[in-house]
Image (cartoon, rainbow, N blue to C red):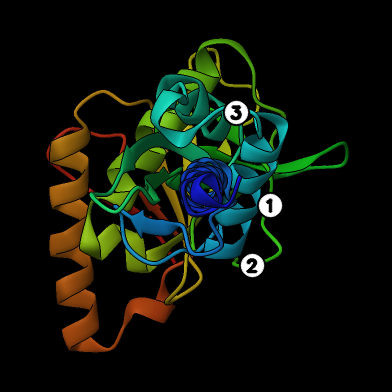
Amino acid sequence: MRKYEHTIKFTLLAAVIVFLYGFAAHRNSLKESKEIKVIFENGDNLFVSYETVNKLLIQNLEANKYQSKENLNLNNLEQFLRNNEMIENAEIFLTISGELGAIITQRTPVLRVANETETYYYDKLGIKMPLSDNYSARVPITSDIISGHGEIDIIRLSNIIKNDEFLRKQIIGIDQMPNSKNNQFELKTRVGDQKIIFGDLSRMEEKIAKLKVFYQKMMLDSTIKDYKTINLKFHNQIVCEK
């Protein structure tokens, strides 16, 4: 029996080593990732925090804890994140070391709706998104109840304001003109507190160019506060009311 004792011990030791190695490898493939690499593609994490994305992914991993990371359906993880109202797009990847990473594109608000019934943002794609506890976007506000084709036009106008440096700084509100047959809009200003009668979205480039020239002149003359309304609806002229 003694002559086999050494062989038996060696075999048992080898079996234990193989078991421990396999167990460690299995645990490593299933372990929760505490430091998921999160990249925000469009700037700072204003509306969705690193912690929120990390928590969402870990919750999903916990629901699939018997599945190794290598066999995870990354498309399902991406869709899981896209279901968040603050996230426009998400791409999930695995690093060389086997850790999860996420590239997040947040929604970009262009208009805030605040009326008697509800308060929310519209993003640049015209999708509603809730207000955030983390950050308040500096975008124009409307108190209108928006529907139908008016929704398309006001989002289009909001995108133009968002993408123009002068308008982005100066326009703080957009309202639909009362009793107008077509979708016509009035703009509220930050400096001077004027009401800009913009009208419909025809000849937008012309209207915006006229407005910029007018403001440059009025700023130089320091007379901008003398005007109550600025009407851009007429061709080749601006009609103002003092």
Residue under numbered circle 3? 83
Q: Amino acid at mark 3?
A: Asn
Q: Given this view, does label 1 or label 3 mark the residue nearer the observer?
A: 3
Residue at the spot 23% in from the left edge and 69% down from the top edge: 215
Give the class, few, some or many, for how many residues have Cα within 10 Å of label 1's Cα (few <14, many ≥20).
some
Residue 73 left/right relative to 163: right
Query: x, y percentage for residue 138?
Result: 49, 64
Quick one: SS at disc 2?
loop
Q: Given this view, does label 1 or label 2 mark the residue nearer the observer?
A: 2
Q: Quadrant of the C terminus?
A: bottom left
Q: Is residue 177 visible?
A: no
Residue under numbered circle 1? 131
Residue 33 left/right relative to 227: right
Query: x, y percentage for residue 77?
Result: 51, 29
Query: x, y percentage for residue 59?
Result: 69, 42
Instruction: Identify which residue, 82 or 140, lies in the foreground.
Output: 82
Residue under numbered circle 2? 134
Residue 172 left/right relative to 202: right
Marks 3 and 2, Cα distance to the nearest angstrom?
Answer: 19 Å
Give the class, few, some or many, for how many residues have Cα within 10 Å of label 3's Cα (few <14, many ≥20).
few
Residue 35 left/right relative to 63: left
Q: Given this view, does label 3 or label 2 mark the residue nearer the observer?
A: 3
Residue at the spot 54% in from the left edge and 12% down from the top edge: 181
Quick one: SS at disc 3?
loop
